Amino acid sequence: MGKTTSRGDAAARAERKFDKKLDFYAKVRQTVASLSTNKAIAKNKKVRSRQKKLKAYDLSTLTEFLPDLKASQQPKPAEFKLKSKTRKNLVLKEDNQLQAVINHPAFQSDPLGAIHQHLQSTQPAVDEKPKIRENKNGNRKGKKKSKASAGLQSMEI
């Protein structure tokens, strides 16, 4: 009632199955190898295109034609955060300076004169008057009072 097969027939079938498996695994290996090479090629293309773009934006060759900026730049003042100890020391120092100014005889006799004298000796002198800016059409900048508004100010209601 079942199929009767000979031993030779079963061995041949097993060998065919084994050959099919080997063929399948060989195809899988080949596919994986081709995918990895395609991936490597694509990665190299991306790297090359990125390098081309960077090369297009590379302006380092122009630096020899530009003037030297390092000589004209001034060092920036150091920015620092005051810690509580430094702040206390600064407050004490400023307090001592203020007390010395208040107790000075020149300040006690004429405070505004002493301040004026101090500013003249410490601040640079200003020789030029500020320039009056003019518009394109030659008028001075700023709003002019109209005759009507000037008349309203002098009128009593």
Image (cartoon, rainbow, N blue to C red):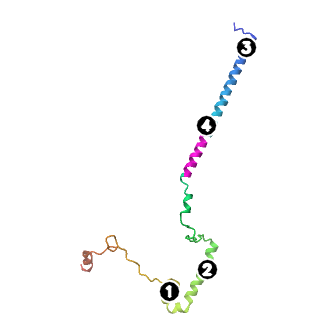
Residue at label 1?
120
Residue at label 4?
38
Amino acid type at mark 3: Ala
Please provide the residue range marked out in magenta. Answer: 41-55
Residue at label 3?
10
Q: How far apart are marks 4 and 3 (CA)?
A: 42 Å
Residue 104 drawn above or below residue 24: below
Q: Distance between the residues labelled 1 and 4?
A: 79 Å
Residue 13, x across and y down, in percent: 71, 15
Residue 142, x across and y down, in percent: 34, 73
Amino acid type at mark 1: Gln
Q: Distance between the residues labelled 2 and 1?
A: 27 Å
Kindly check if marks 2 and 1 are in contact, taking CB atoms under 8 A apart as contact.
no
Q: Distance between the residues labelled 1 and 3?
A: 117 Å
Q: Distance between the residues labelled 3 and 2?
A: 104 Å
Which of the marked residues, 1 or 3, is nearer the chain's N terminus? 3
Kindly check if marks 1 and 4 are in contact, taking CB atoms under 8 A apart as contact.
no
